């Protein structure tokens, strides 16, 4: 699986959009970009994933650059409950058993 | 309630003892996983299972044993616990939806294990 690079930490004001970047310059053509988050003392939670098109669901939006070397997770209206560590993971989607390789992630602090 | 559960949630054991962590899921997902998370670090895969009676090693399998006699259960056993196995253990499950669709992993709440 391709390696990802994320900032160690970010702050965001409550109610504002949180934009979390991720670099994955060695991503392969069959690898998807996944985002998970981990709220303190809880198990990781799936947020969103994509291959090359931008994606949106009820939790977030995922913007993937045309060359697929980087992406941005957008939480449109961050709340205090969004304070968590956010993990960007790239993984081939050809086998459900493919492991998720968690790096250090970005610690997002949403402030009132 | 449907979902994925782990037990116990907290466990303290002594070095050299055998301890088993339980994981149960109600979705009938084919795949199940065990991860460990050490303080300040990301998760590392210990073992995974593609179906009942099929298991495979992950990134850090040494010192652990798994079994999967039933689809819904995936216990993790530390045969002789060591202090280096003090960690938070997460179980996860996923399913292959076919048609090129993803199969996100759903995680349990974790078991905090301390080996003294």
Image: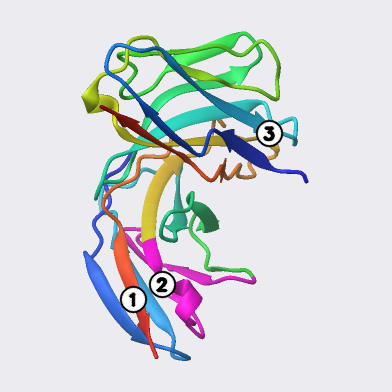
Colouring: rainbow
Tell me if residue B26 can be seen.
yes
Residue A54 to residue A76: above or below: above
Q: Badge 2 local density, few (<14 within 10 Å), some, or many (20+)?
A: many
- Say which residue label 1 marks: A109
Residues at discs 3 and 1 both on one chain: no
The kind of secondary structure element at disc 3 is strand
Q: Which residues are magenta?
A: A58-85
- Say which residue label 3 marks: B25
Residue B50 percent coordinates (x, y): 59, 20
**CB within 8 Å, label 3 to label 1:** no
**CB within 8 Å, label 2 to label 1:** yes
Q: Residue at x 25, y 53 (%)?
A: A25
The kind of secondary structure element at disc 1 is strand
In this picture, residue A109 sits left or right of residue A93: left
Residue A31 percent coordinates (x, y): 43, 44
- Say which residue label 2 marks: A83
N-terminal of the pair, mark 2 or mark 1, is 2
Please identify the residue farthest to the right as the structure is shown.
Answer: B1
Q: Badge 1 local density, few (<14 within 10 Å), some, or many (20+)?
A: many
């Amino acid at each position: 699986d391709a390696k990802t690079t994320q900032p160690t930490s970010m702050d965001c004001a409550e109610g504002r959009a949180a934009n979390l970047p991720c670099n994955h310059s060695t991503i392969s053509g069959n690898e998807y970009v996944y985002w998970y988050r981990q709220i303190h003392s809880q198990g990781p939670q799936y947020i969103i994933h994509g291959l090359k098109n931008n994606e949106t669901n009820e939790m977030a939006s995922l913007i993937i650059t045309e060359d697929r070397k980087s992406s941005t997770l957008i939480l449109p209206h961050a709340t205090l409950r969004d304070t968590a560590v956010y993990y960007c993971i790239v993984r081939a989607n050809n086998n459900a058993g493919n492991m998720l390789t968690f790096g250090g992630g970005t610690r997002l602090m949403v402030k009132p | 309630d449907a979902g994925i559960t782990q037990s116990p949630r907290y466990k303290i054991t002594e070095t050299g003892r055998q301890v088993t962590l339980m994981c149960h899921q109600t979705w009938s997902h084919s795949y199940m996983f065990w991860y460990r998370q050490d303080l300040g670090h990301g998760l590392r895969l210990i073992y995974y299972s593609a179906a009942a009676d099929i298991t495979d090693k992950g990134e850090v399998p040494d010192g652990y044993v798994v079994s999967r006699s039933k689809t819904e259960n995936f216990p993790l056993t530390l045969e002789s616990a060591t202090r280096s196995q003090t960690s938070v253990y997460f179980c996860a499950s996923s399913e292959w939806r076919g048609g090129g669709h993803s199969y996100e992993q759903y995680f349990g709440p974790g078991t905090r294990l301390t080996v003294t």
